[in-house]
């Protein structure tokens, strides 16, 4: 049997679809999530939330709630404000003048904002008590769109005096010259990218324990804990080392779990007020949908596009308003992060973007999957598509005309970002083949004769990964962070086991598996012989200030750290084995022998297994020579990508290390009687450089596709004019289900990144390819009906309003072409 | 879930349950499958003093044919009806049962609960309005039988008293050359439809001898589309008459604008759904085996 296994053993584990090590635990229900924790004397917290989008809080009366047996204490906004400092603001003024507490003080600014909390001996009592908290409100006019917010007629934050958070002009190249010389100028009055969210299977959950000695413990599912701690420590008056954060299994984040540090603060204060008893808060689904985090909503006004006579885009200018919801939290980073992908996948050299970010009476934003780049890439894809139809150039031809060419990589964008590698035309070719492009074009023409509306659309997008935090200085020159890093630790344990610990917070990305693959290759052993400890822990695991799982980076940052640590360990193991075996280091090789993993002298049966090595260091160590005595078999490595601080004046520099690409093609038919768009066929092609685990990558691609299709056709965070969120349950938010999913033809190419040790690129976010492809397919089907797809969210109802009511998406009201400008 | 506190009672018979509801008064409610009641309790939109659990009552979930009638116990689960061979002669029942929400809900939710709730968006009220159906109700004062056409009074209101319970649904087997179909447009499977239409008809050659058409989600109650029926009853079935029926149904629909769609859009959906359901019903009446599924976003 072992022989058969031997024969099956691949040359390298990296690159194989190794089954996920974590799945056995997770599928059997043996995973451990925050809510699974039970501590002695643990209490339960329930937030009392504002039912209004914008209201003055006249009175919060907790007396009746506190009388309910089992209630230990309560917290109100005023009390919270007296117990802590407001959270720091990342950006400069005017945004920096916003006073952000984790609970509404005197004024509620979005529906679902916590105004009080009750802490009780059971969840049931807490829920009952929450109903006994009486809050008097005075409703205020709400502002629910970015375009209204920027007019400052209703102002959210009196301390700031304006809804504007940040505004900056991004200009690169020679924009005016390009417009002067253009053969065509296409004007697009308004495009809009809608709000949706991530809806992870597991909602936010926090267990806080503030011990009498001042140490504050958090068991939580925050996916970027180092970021959270840096907000929490100064606000709560603690030193960083007094805060212990631990994560365990996390049921999905997609970025939305980065911004629950306010709730962490509330739980901490509750624990302290309750006399140092642990306090648990588990978010409800409605809480998650209304008050957790939404993606940035963006409106693009007065867009002008200069093109040459062949349809090659020469310049783009646009005025953009990003609506980040009621508080800034992770913002205004979104106001710069889009510029990681300024030209999209195209060779545009001249751009002028007037970018403003505003607050509104909606749920604060979180850096959700595709964060800020997704919004910009959708804009670029719409610009390209709209121009292609206006100029009468086929959408695929238009793309081929404008794509950065394979031989141009590494490609420097107008703002100094370096696209590492890629081959967009090849991806288009593969996607066309997968979807049966020619067949569909034929079918489309036949169907047209019957009055059927079929559209075929391409979405080409980027997933920029491993970001340079130095880009935050473009927003705020005094921002105290830059670069990026991740740590890994690897050791040979007393019993000879290989144990790796990581600074990441995996939420389904399979870090245990891919880490084991890398280490197995380094040590020439089986991945089962590698134990990987995931879960962030400020006390027990290794980490850096950038540690976490976000922004498509583990394949580069995490695995580079693992690789680096393994190199250090191998060096030590060799030194030790050479001493033990009285051999030369260069004669040693790694492998698996009869006594398990070992080092052996090549061509002999002289070997020492890992237990033997560990024994020398840890147990049986009398008489070791000095040069051996310093070895620990416990090696930490920090990976740092080679970033520089960007040139702040020019807003120029390399903002991200790797650029994975996705190209999707959607074939969509609009039901002639119900106007609902139905996906008839779908292809997704991925290029994330060298693939570490094809099965995991394909899973990520399919997941991102589902998220994108859901966002394009089903999922929207809708508010009415007074700030009521109308999609606060799954009945109304309707997250995508398997039944809504088309069959996805999957393909991939590998353009190895020259900038990562393994050629890999981060790829978890997917760049919203499905949103782009569906908008493109609808545009393809409906251009001849005088319709311009100007919104990222489309339902049967909107298409009905467009086609029958002629109320929305009317090209005549939106797009104007100036011909022969040159 | 953490509902408001309530007392729990497990009834051993429908009669006992009815007496309990009578005793306990308006603050009490019967729990069948819990498909709607449990979410309402979870969100605390409903607070009860007492919950009377019907799920342990024996003998009220059978599906049997007696002479030319099918007797369905009120506690029959959607999943039971989805799998039932007894109801196979009435394919519209399978359309309905198999299209409700998801597996978990179909395994718990009951036909009786769905009818008793009288939700204008419910699936069973819409489907059963197109069939000759009698509903058997049990109360502390005894039993009574109500034709389904008289059962629904208003949104979430049926003719049943607070202490009355449904015990069974009696469906008369349709004559030969009958067929029906139930189609809905839903944004995703677990949610209520945006609009739905049920059509059940009997053919004599190309002539529609009898027809029942009902519309869901587009009014305060499920709507029996009598004008639409008139466009088909006694007339020969062709694209023209089907279109006329669909147009009539569109006019009879009385929807409201909400998150799922505007008034005009819902009417448009009704037209399409009635047309398509009628087409399938005709094919089935002619003996064809047709599989249908709801439309999803």
Image: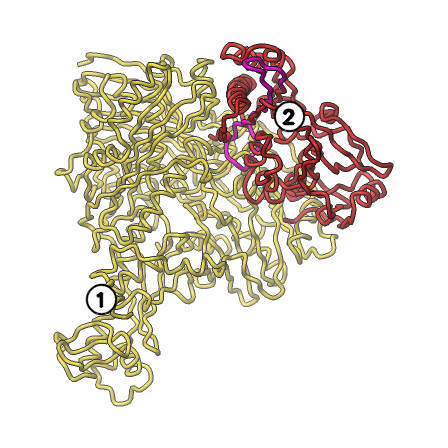
Chain colours: A yellow, B red
Chain of the residue displaying label 1: A
Image: magenta residue range: B183-211
Chain of the residue displaying label 2: B
Which residue sits at x=82%, y=43%? B15
Q: Quarter-wise, where is residue B143 in the image? A: top right
Which residue sits at x=29%, y=46%? A465
Does residue B204 appear anywhere in the picture? yes
Instruction: Give the residue at the far bottom of this rendering.
Output: A623
Does residue A97 appear anywhere in the picture? no
**Residue situated in front as seen by the camera: A380 or B93:** B93
Q: Where's residue A361, x and y in %?
A: 52, 33
Return the residue at label 2. B174
**Residue situated in front as seen by the camera: A482 or A374:** A374
Relative placement, left or right, of B10 versus A79 is right
Q: Secondary structure at mark 2?
A: loop
Q: Where's residue A33, x and y in %?
A: 50, 57
Magenta region, main secondary structure: strand
Task: Say which quadrant the N terminus of chain A sits in.
Answer: bottom left
Residue A490: which disc?
Answer: none
Return the residue at label 1. A567
Q: Where's residue B63, x and y in %?
A: 66, 39
Q: Where's residue A556, x and y in %?
A: 27, 53
**Residue situated in front as seen by the camera: B264 or A291:** B264
């Amino acid at each position: 049997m072992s022989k058969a296994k031997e024969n099956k053993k691949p040359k390298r584990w990296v690159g194989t679809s190794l089954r996920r090590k974590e799945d056995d635990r997770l599928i059997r229900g043996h995973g451990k999530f925050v809510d699974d924790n039970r501590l002695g004397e643990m209490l339960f917290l329930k937030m009392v939330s504002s039912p209004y989008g914008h209201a003055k809080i006249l009175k919060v009366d907790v007396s009746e709630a506190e009388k309910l047996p089992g209630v230990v204490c309560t917290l109100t906004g005023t009390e919270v404000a007296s117990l802590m400092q407001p959270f720091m603001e990342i950006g400069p003024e005017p945004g920096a003048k916003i006073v952000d507490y984790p609970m509404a003080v005197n004024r509620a600014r979005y529906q679902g904002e916590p105004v009080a909390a009750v802490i009780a001996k059971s969840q049931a009592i807490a829920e009952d008590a929450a109903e006994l908290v009486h809050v008097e409100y005075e409703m205020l006019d709400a502002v629910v769109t970015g375009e209204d917010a920027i007019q400052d007629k209703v102002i959210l934050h009196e301390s700031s005096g304006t809804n504007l958070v940040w505004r900056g002009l991004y200009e690169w190249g020679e924009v005016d010259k390009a417009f002067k010389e253009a053969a065509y100028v296409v004007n697009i009055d308004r495009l809009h990218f809608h709000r949706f969210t991530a809806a992870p299977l597991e909602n936010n959950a926090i267990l806080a324990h503030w011990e009498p000695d001042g140490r504050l413990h958090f068991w939580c599912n925050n996916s970027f804990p180092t970021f959270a701690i840096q907000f929490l420590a100064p606000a709560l008056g603690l030193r960083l080392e007094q805060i212990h954060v631990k994560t365990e299994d996390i049921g999905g984040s997609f970025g939305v779990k980065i911004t629950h540090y306010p709730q962490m603060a509330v739980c901490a204060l509750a624990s302290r007020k309750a006399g140092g008893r642990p306090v648990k808060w588990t978010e409800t689904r409605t809480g998650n949908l209304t008050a957790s985090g939404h993606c940035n909503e963006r409106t693009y006004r007065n867009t002008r596009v200069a093109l040459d006579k062949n349809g090659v885009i020469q310049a783009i200018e646009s005025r953009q308003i990003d609506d980040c919801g009621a508080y800034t939290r992770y913002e205004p980073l979104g106001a710069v992060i889009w510029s990681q992908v300024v030209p999209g996948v195209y060779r545009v050299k001249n751009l002028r973007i007037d970018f403003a970010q505003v607050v509104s009476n909606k749920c604060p934003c979180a850096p959700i999957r595709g964060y800020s780049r997704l919004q910009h890439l959708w804009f670029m894809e719409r610009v390209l598509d709209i121009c292609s139809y206006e100029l009468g150039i086929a959408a695929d031809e238009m793309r081929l005309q404008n794509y950065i060419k394979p031989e141009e990589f590494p490609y420097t964008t107008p703002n100094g970002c370096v696209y590492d590698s890629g081959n967009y035309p090849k991806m288009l070719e593969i996607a066309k083949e997968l979807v049966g492009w020619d067949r569909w074009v034929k079918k489309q023409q036949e169907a047209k004769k019957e009055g059927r509306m079929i559209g075929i659309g391409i979405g080409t997008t980027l997933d920029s990964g491993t970001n340079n935090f130095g880009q935050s200085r473009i927003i705020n020159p005094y921002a105290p962070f830059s670069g990026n890093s991740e740590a890994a630790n690897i050791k040979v344990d007393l019993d000879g086991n290989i144990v790796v610990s990581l600074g990441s917070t995996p939420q389904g990305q399979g870090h245990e598996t891919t880490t084991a693959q890398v280490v197995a290759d380094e040590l020439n052993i089986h991945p089962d012989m590698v134990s990987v400890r995931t879960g962030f822990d400020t006390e027990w695991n290794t980490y850096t200030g950038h540690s976490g799982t976000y922004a498509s980076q583990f394949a580069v940052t995490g695995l580079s750290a693992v690789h680096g640590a393994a190199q250090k360990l191998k060096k030590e193991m060799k030194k030790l084995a050479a001493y033990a075996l009285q051999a030369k280091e260069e004669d040693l090789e790694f492998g698996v022998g009869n006594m398990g993993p070992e080092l052996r002298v090549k061509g002999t049966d002289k070997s020492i297994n890992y237990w033997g090595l560990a024994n020398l260091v840890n147990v049986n160590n009398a008489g070791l020579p000095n040069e051996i005595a310093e070895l620990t078999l416990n090696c930490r490595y920090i990976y740092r990508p080679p970033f520089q601080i960007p040139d702040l004046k020019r807003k120029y520099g390399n903002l991200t290390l790797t650029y994975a690409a996705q190209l999707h093609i959607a074939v969509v038919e609009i039901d002639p009687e119900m106007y609902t768009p139905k996906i008839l066929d779908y292809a997704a092609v991925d290029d994330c450089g060298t693939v570490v685990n094809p099965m995991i990558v394909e899973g990520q691609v399919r997941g991102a596709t589902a998220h994108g299709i859901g966002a394009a056709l089903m999922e929207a965070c809708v508010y009415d004019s007074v700030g009521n969120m109308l999609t606060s349950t799954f009945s109304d938010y309707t997250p995508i289900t398997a039944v809504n999913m088309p069959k996805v033809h999957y393909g991939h190419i590998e353009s190895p990144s020259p900038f990562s040790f393994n050629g890999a690129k981060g790829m978890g976010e997917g760049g919203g390819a499905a949103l782009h492809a569906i908008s493109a397919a609808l545009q393809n089907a409906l251009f001849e009906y005088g319709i311009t797809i100007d919104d990222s969210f489309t339902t049967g109802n909107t298409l009905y309003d467009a086609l029958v009511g002629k109320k929305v998406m009317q090209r005549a009201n939106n797009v104007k072409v100036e011909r022969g400008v040159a | 879930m953490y509902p408001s506190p309530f007392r729990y009672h497990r009834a051993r018979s429908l009669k006992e349950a009815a007496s309990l509801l009578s005793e306990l008064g308006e603050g009490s409610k019967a729990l069948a499958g819990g498909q709607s009641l449990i979410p309402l309790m979870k969100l605390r939109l409903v607070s009860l003093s007492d919950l009377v659990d019907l799920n342990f009552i024996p003998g009220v979930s059978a599906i049997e044919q007696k002479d030319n009638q099918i007797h369905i116990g009120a506690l029959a689960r959607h999943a039971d009806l989805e799998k039932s061979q007894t109801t196979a002669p009435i394919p519209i029942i399978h359309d309905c049962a198999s299209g409700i929400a998801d597996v978990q809900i179909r395994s718990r939710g009951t036909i009786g609960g769905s009818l008793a709730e009288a939700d204008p968006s419910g699936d069973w009220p819409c489907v059963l309005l197109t069939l000759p159906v009698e509903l058997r109700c049990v109360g502390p004062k005894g039993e009574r039988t109500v034709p389904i056409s008289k059962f629904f009074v208003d949104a979430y209101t049926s003719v049943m008293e607070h202490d009355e319970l449904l015990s069974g649904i009696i469906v008369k087997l349709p004559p030969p050359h009958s067929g029906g179909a139930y189609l809905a447009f839903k944004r995703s499977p677990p949610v209520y439809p945006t609009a739905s239409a049920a059509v059940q008809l009997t053919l004599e050659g190309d002539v529609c001898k009898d027809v029942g058409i009902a519309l869901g989600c587009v009014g305060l109650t499920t709507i029996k589309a009598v004008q639409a029926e008139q466009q088909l009853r006694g007339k020969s079935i062709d694209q023209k008459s089907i279109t006329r029926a669909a147009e009539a149904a569109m006019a009879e629909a009385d929807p409201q604008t909400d998150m799922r769609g505007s008034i005009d859009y819902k009417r448009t959906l009704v037209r399409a759904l009635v047309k398509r359901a009628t087409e399938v019903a005709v094919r089935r009446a002619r003996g064809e085996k047709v599989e249908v599924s709801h439309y999803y976003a």
